[in-house]
Image (tube, rainbow, N blue to C red):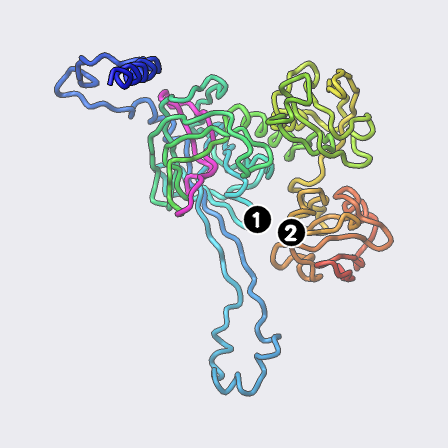
Amino acid sequence: MKKAVVISTIAALMLSAATINFNEAPKEFTRVMPNSGTNTVLSFYDAIKDAKESVVNISTKKKIKMPNMQNMPFFNDPFFKQFFGPMFRDRLPRNRVERSLGSGVIISNDGYIVTNNHVIKNADEITVTLPGDDKEYKAKVIGKDALTDLAVIKIDKKGLKAIKIADSSKIKPGDLVFAIGNPFGIGETITQGIISATNRNNVGINTYENFIQTDAAINPGNSGGALVDSRGALIGINSAIITRSGGNNGIGFAIPSNMMKEVVKKLVEKGKIERGYLGVIIEDLKGDLKDVYKHKYGAVIVDVTKDSAADKAGLKRGDLIIEVEGKKIEDANELKTIIGSYPPGKEIAIKYERNKNVHTAKVKLGKRPGGETEATQSLKGLEVQTLDDNLRRMYNIPENVKGVFVTNVKPDSAAEKAGIKPGDVIIGIEDVEITNVEDLKKALKKYKTPIRVYIKRQGIPLILVLK
């Protein structure tokens, strides 16, 4: 009996040794109103009323040409005609107009407006409506950048109220924010939330990502609108939400105002953005990879494109890039962003680790393939991209196929009449091999119409005539 008591006492002592001390909040506290006045309304109206006047509604129209049903074999089948009757032919849709709504932010008093690229992409007509004004203004595209999903449009109107722009590097999680836009076309709408996180990347929405995450409701139509702080200063351009139901789940993303300013400045000055290209596929240094390298930060090269800037500079698979032009590289996203900030032809110093030793390479950046680029005026309405690794993987295009990928063909254009379709790869113009957009432009200037255009469509070579 005594032995059992001793054992139980020892067990109790052993259990009591494993204790935890909680950091308890004070149990006594006082509840107070935000303002002690009994006739006071807590409101941010005065703080954001000016910002609200800087957010516009954007309406776009796109003509969709319907296929000609009368050219289809079954249309002239006697049974088909007997079943549907002669009136069916007259009721077939010829074409339709696709409409969409979005938002934009006034950034200058002389008519410049920033929005998302996906809001105005492929639009034949863009209309802007100002807050409190029923008049519609036709807008023209100044420039667009698909890789950051930003675009600049302009209306012919002076004296507009440009939004005040904040330094987005100063924001912190927990800051109060407001999303301003025009969801569903019902008029200006404001939703409130906080900053949930900053520097979000690898979301899979854009090529260049450095998102502000917020729980402020960003609904359809809010895209391109403003995310402002409690002063009413712009900290981001509303871009997207993550949802499984189609509604808002409290996970919204905005493009930081600092990134927006850099992109917009280049678009206004040049109408496009040319980014430096290193020619590598990279990954973050994480997990067991950290045991292989001396440095515990950087971007690991997992593949090098042949004849690229990286290849010519001697960079190899397995190298860990830790510094570019004296700037520390924390991860793959930071390397991608920094390289993209330099123009093609810029020579930069890259510091990297190889076999535990640190080396420095001088790299002359190439021109990034891809990106939305309209071809020359001879093919107005045709949008193409130089084939890159992403496009090849996405559309299962073999590596031996060189050329430019057709992303869009506008209705009634010369390209459409020639039979060129989205998804085609243009591989030749007359006797000129086409390997990039510049080759295409030069070839179109060299030859007069009619021009023979060689393409590959789902791997099948075809020849078309452009008039």
- How far across and how far down the image is residue 242, in percent? 45, 40
- How far across and how far down the image is residue 385, in percent? 69, 45
Extreme residue in the right direction: 431
Q: Quadrant of residue 131?
A: top left
Label 2 element class = loop
Q: Is residue 148 left or right of residue 425?
A: left
Amino acid type at circle 2 is Gly
Amino acid type at circle 1 is Asn
Label 1 element class = loop
Q: Quadrant of residue 190?
A: top left
- How far across and how far down the image is residue 32, in percent? 17, 16
- Give the vertical position of 196 relative to 101 (above or below): above
Q: Is residue 376 visible?
A: yes
Q: Kindly identify which residue carries mark 2.
A: 381
Q: Kindly identify which residue carries mark 1.
A: 122
Front residue of 70/339: it is: 339
Residue name at image x 17 percent, y 20 percent: 40
- Give the vertical position of 45 relative to 13 (above or below): below
Front residue of 147/452: it is: 147
Extreme residue in the left direction: 38
The quarter of the rendered structure image containing the C terminus is bottom right
Q: Earlier in the sequence, mark 1 or mark 2?
A: 1
